[in-house]
Amino acid sequence: MGREEFVAIIHTDDLNQLKEVAERIRQLCENSSYSYQDLNIKVTISIGGTLFKKDDNINDLTHRADQLMYKAKNTGRNKSVIQ
């Protein structure tokens, strides 16, 4: 979506399953690293996720997910906020 943001579409209508997938992705990033010269580079991610609602359009969905991602960032980073 942006310079440091991306969108993933997860095929589910189960909020708990979405939470599990988001948390697994977050943990995989947290536990990964990249070695460059004598540096070991690690990154973390903040995830916002939501389910598509009956009257949503793509802008509604991405706006809600974006707001949740910023909530994750503003409440400590390296976490997922799924609603």
Image: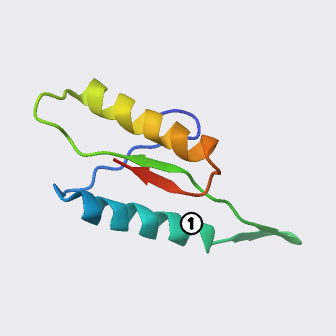
In the image, is 46 to the left or to the right of 68? right
Query: Picture quarter containing residue 66?
Result: top left
Q: Position of residue 29 (x, y in %)?
A: 56, 66
Q: Position of residue 21 (x, y in %)?
A: 35, 65
Q: Residue at x 86, y 69 (%)?
A: 37
Q: Residue at x 61, y 46 (%)?
A: 75
Q: Quadrant of the N terminus?
A: top left
Q: Position of residue 9 (x, y in %)?
A: 28, 49
Alpha-carbon neighbours of circle 1 within 10 Å: few (<14), some, or many (≥20)? some
User: Residue 62 versus residue 34: which sits nearer the camera?
Assistant: 62
Q: Residue at x 89, y 72 (%)?
A: 38
Query: Picture quarter containing residue 79?
Result: bottom right
Q: How many marks?
A: 1
Q: Position of residue 11 (x, y in %)?
A: 19, 56
Q: In the orientation shown, which residue stands out farthest toward the right?
A: 38
- When the figure is inspected, residue 12 is found, relative to residue 83, above or below; the finding is below
In the image, is 69 to the left or to the right of 34? left
Display coloring: rainbow
In the picture of the structure, the residue carrying the numbered disc 1 is: 29
Tell me which amino acid carries mark 1.
Cys
In the image, is 9 to the left or to the right of 78? left
Q: In the orientation shown, which residue stands out farthest toward the left?
A: 54
Q: Residue at x 65, y 51 (%)?
A: 76
Q: Secondary structure at mark 1?
A: helix
User: Residue 38 versus residue 78: which sits nearer the camera?
Assistant: 78
- When the figure is inspected, residue 62 is found, relative to residue 31, above or below; the finding is above
